[in-house]
Amino acid sequence: MKKVAILGFGAAGYHGAQGVRMTDAEAVIDVYTDTAFGPHNPMLTTYYAKNALPYQGMFPYGSLEEVQERLNLQVFRASPVAELKTAEKAIRTAGGRTAWYDSILIATGASAFVPKIPGAGLPGVFSMRTEADARYLKERLESGAVRSGLVVGISWSGIKVAENFAQRGIPCTLMNRSAQAFSHALFPETAERVLAHFQERGLQISLGKTLQRIEQGADGGLSAFTRDGQQLTADIIVMTSGIRPNLDFLSTEDICTEGGLLVDPHMETCVPGIYAAGDCCAAYDIFTGTQKNIALWMNSVEQGRVAGVNMAGGSARFRGNLPVSLGHCLGLDFLSVGDPSAAVPTGRVYEYADKQLYIRAARNGRKLHCINVIGAAECSGAIKNAFIKSIEAPDAALSIQTACLLRSQGFPDDFIKFLGGKHLD
Amino acid sequence: MTELEEKLKAKIPGADTGIEVKRSICAICSPSHHCGLNCYVKDGTIIRVEGDPDHPYSHGKLCTKGSATRSYVYRKDRIRTPMRRIGERGEGKFEPISWDEAYQLIAQGLNRVKTEYSPHSVAFFSGYSKWYRPIYQRFAHVFGSVNFGTDDSVCAVAMKMGDNLTTGGGAAPDMAHSNTFLGWNFDGYYSEHLSIEGVQKLKARGGKVIIIDIRKTPAAKNLADIFLQIRPGTDGALALGMAKLIIDNGWADMDYVERYTYGFDQYKELAGQYPLEKVSEITGLRAEDIYEAAKVFATNGPACTNFSASALVHRINGFNTHRSIVCLMALTGNYDRVGGNYPVPATYLRQPAGFSTRDELFRNERYPKDGPERIGAQRFPLWESSFNEFQAMDLLRTLEEGTPYPVKAIFALGMNAKMFPETERLLEAMKEHLDFFVDVDVFMTRAAAYADIVLPACTSVERSELKCYRGGYLYYTRPVIEPLYESKSDVDILCELAKAMDLDDDLLKSGYEACLDWMIEGCGITMAELKESGRPMLVPTAKWPVKPGSCLENGFRTPTGKIEFYATAVAAIDPKYGLDPLPSYRDSLEDQNDPDTKADYPFYLCTGARVAYSIHSRSQRTPWLRSMCPVPTCEINQEDARRLDIANGDQVTISSPYGSIRMRAHVTGKTLAGVVLAQHGYTEANVNSLLGRDHLDPYTGFPGYKGMRCNISKYEGG
Amino acid sequence: MKYVFTFDEDRCSACGACRMGCIDQNDIDIESGESCFRRTYEDEIELKDGGLYCVYLSAACMHCENAPCIDACPAGCIKKDQETGFTVYDNTNCIGCKSCALACPFGAPVFRKSDGKMVKCDGCNIRVKNGLKPACVRACSFGALDCVAEADFNASEGGKACSQLLKNLGLQKYS
């Protein structure tokens, strides 16, 4: 009988367990988690805070007990793994339990990155990742005592926190270290339009500012000081500058990491029998052809499942990461596929704007390297797919159905041509 | 969600959900169809509609329009109460009044014109639909007016006249026994959706399909073995050219010609003027394609054709074009033969069902004796002698000129002003010259806005009506919901008005069902039985299927008793009108070919070519259907568009000597260079306003909707 | 019993009847700008020989075996109906993030402004379970669109399943 361990129980851990279970009904599955909750989706925190979702909604697969029963798991709750002995495939928990396995899935996820600056630990300064973060934001906003907010880091979660303020009519400043927001996803032209939209909806934008320290005044209000001497006051400060993989328990001498645990398309690390999936791993990336850490819910789901199937003796391959994101905030959708910074001087750029749509796309010779679209979320999957196609088969044109969908949604013929034209199946 | 909640949301019929399936018919399009509906009704409201699988004609099928029934019935612009105009004509300001008051006002208004002028100065006019027309026509005549006219002035009657004058009546294709289907202007995907299955079956049997059309259609793609994309308006030349090929190559059925036709020598001489090269040049088709089509049609065994109801006769050369196609059927011996086309006599509402009723007698028996000629008679004598309605295309002139006698009142059911060429001029003339104008309609329309009294009619699902169907059926429908608001069935309005006016006709005054009892008496079934059943019933006297060969055996219902290549009825018309008894061809833009007009308006404008989701103006304002093409659109060939710097989706101006409209351009390779196809029926872009009131076929008075000159340019405004 | 939608392009004219059926069944508020779950398309392609290929299509959710929208939904709203095989959803917890749209190559999930939630074709799951055809299929007069039991479809061979496209896109089941 196979015996597997799953370290961490978010999307990757849950789907890892499910992958094992759907391949092997008998396997013993031990789950080690540092919480007492069912698998939690960090993306849902801000939705809970704005009452778009009930509390239980943050746990899309149900409570830990329900999941445990559904998948027949042995769950060690509040038992973070302190040590992984890769050679023996053994784990030791903080509580001192040691156990040996046929295979192990590392799915420990990632945590919010908080810069180590003075005042980062003050009450009212927090990040947005966990169930506790969500409850705290909601409580504070609903207390009626918050008159202003500061969000440090224009990130996918940062803008959703800011939306919480804006929708409650609470003044909020979005501060960003870089002079361009979303520089890894958006062209400067796109970012400008996105931020202009946020400003129209009442958000203050502050770019190119590095936070130096936070102080608390006598009234409990917070003051944030930037490196260039600016002072901003706010009742709460949310740190949303990104996330870092949870790999502290590992010795990097024993296992290969590079911004995350390096895995092959089967989600196996460089150590046979040890797998990794989700926000803690760096999996094969379709776009660059290298291994990259791209923390997306859907990646975690697929990676977890692939790992689980393989751990149980089945065979599955991960199709690959793709740098893709669909932001939606304050009534604006903006899609990014690829990498805007991958341009070469000989590349071509396409731009289009009308009342509903903004498109900016660029290609280097035969391959597209970035597409930004504002205002057409319903077509985002079709565009993403066209992008993948341009990488995997640069000479293949769009399918007729894709071309028709784009046309019907107001995309100009020239853009369809830019994507590669259409072809007959 | 509980299971019941799920079922309610999914509209599952049953006792638990309280959703009942009730049967009715769709009357959105032509009475040749009227498919069976299954209406899902909950608490007196229709919540879903689908085709009725038990319907003997449509077998569960519905087209795009019928599938949008709910959007049509619950349109927000339904007229809710009887109304009296309080603003200027055309302004659209009305106040609600009671039905009684409305009837009194109508009686006074009509009788005043009758007294001051004559009963014939009241024109009774009907737009769509056609189901109430026996009642309506009798009403007009009992009132005392000869002037009953309808949309038949521009619909399919030109084709029927061509049939009647050539062979004595219409003829249906015998698809089941044919080897070749000549689909002349056929696109069953867009109109007559039930016809597709027959063509699919013919193909599956190995039959050949020839499609002739001015644009690349789904039928051309999915069905055609031979597709001729013909230059618009030149079908008559093609038919004569095919006739020449058939005669010259010995493919004609000369035995048939000798026994059953009249005027072959003159016809042969006419066809002789259309050698292949000339026809190729006129039609824009390759000579070898024409030859191939003619050969397959004439030599592949029995061949049948659709007779396109309107498309070909909506040109000023339309009547003869249709006649020339009918003549091809006779030339090849395919008329009234198995696998060809054969006569199927009308039963009721001019639709065939294999038995007889007295509806035509009901319409005509009270025609005023010693009345004057009808409106348009002096301009269109062939129409006047061939059809029992006034030619509405002369209404505008009559209003303006008041000759030979003035028209001072119009009583209308569903009048669609946008049907008339130079629409605005007609509305102006009505505003200026009419003493009284009543319009009954389901929806508030452009014409209704000019009426003094407006009455709300209901739709087919809110009333009972009698229909006959192929196969020998009669069907008296039951309402599936109560009439919305204060609306009423058109026939109830007419019969109640007959009572209020105390017209001299006990039948009309005794109501619709009594009239129907009179009309169907002798067919072997009674209204009581039909009412009781609520389902289509087989009529005992019906003989179905109608068999081919009756005319070959008993003679054709023409003056000569034969199929007339040379139409004696046309020959009987005063030569001053210049009508040719032979199906001769002339240019469909003949009256617009002077050098100036040609230079200023170089494009061929064809309006109203069918699309699946549209039937005249009624669908343009039905939200679900409108969503298929939200903006008034015209099609232009991609080469023309390139030359004129028009991109797909651009706004364009279409202009004619009569005005200009703005539409969105759909740039396509499906239409030929030099041709503009425009959708009709839009208020904000009424393409019929570009059509001259005198651009008419002299044989029938039919307007050249599908053949007129225009120019098109990119709209440069904001 | 699992079901498969089939589509025969050679019988389609993009007439839109299927769309009307869908609007009718799902009470889609077209007038307010809501998108129908089923879309019909007309397009044309110039061929190398100078000819023109006219395209007529009808498309909605493909009910992929390995539906990416299910994985993509952060709130766990979408799942497979075990009986019919349709990709169904309960959008009570939908946050309108459109992740499903980003996952779908076909544009099937659409955003409904009135409640800020995503909606899509569910194959008329409850109708099918009650022995009725999906509304779009019911409305097709030309035999272009059908929904048949998977077993019958597999037995028929050569049928034109909507899911043919899916193979190319890797949306079939893990083998």
Image (spheres, coloured by chain):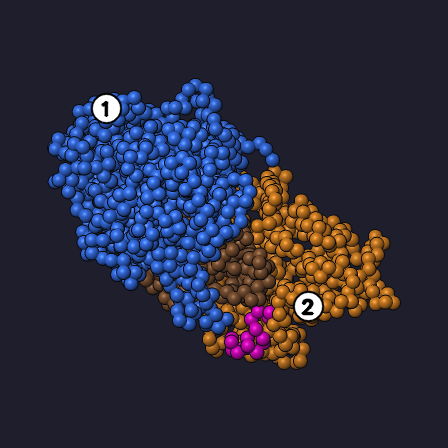
Residue A333 percent location from the top left of the image: 61, 53
Tell me the subunit letter for badge 1: B
Residue C147 percent location from the top left of the image: 37, 59
Mark 1: give few (<14), some (14-19) or many (20+) Cα within 10 Å.
Answer: some
Q: Which residue is mark 2?
A: A134
In this rendering, the answer to whether C43 lies above or below A201 is above
Give the color of chain B as drawn.
Answer: blue
In this rendering, the answer to whether B93 lies above or below A240 is above
Question: Could you tell me the amino acid type at mark 2?
Answer: Ala
In this rendering, the answer to whether A301 lies above or below B552 is below
- SS class of the residue under badge 1? helix
The answer to whether residue A182 is seen in the rendering is yes
Between marks 2 and 1 in the image, the one whose residue lies nearer the viewer? 1
- SS class of the residue under badge 2? helix
Q: How many marks?
A: 2
Q: CA distance from mark 2 to mark 1?
A: 89 Å
Tell me the subunit letter for badge 2: A
* Magenta residue span: A57-73
User: Judging from the image, what is the letter of the chain drawn in orange?
Assistant: A
* Mark seen at residue B270: 1
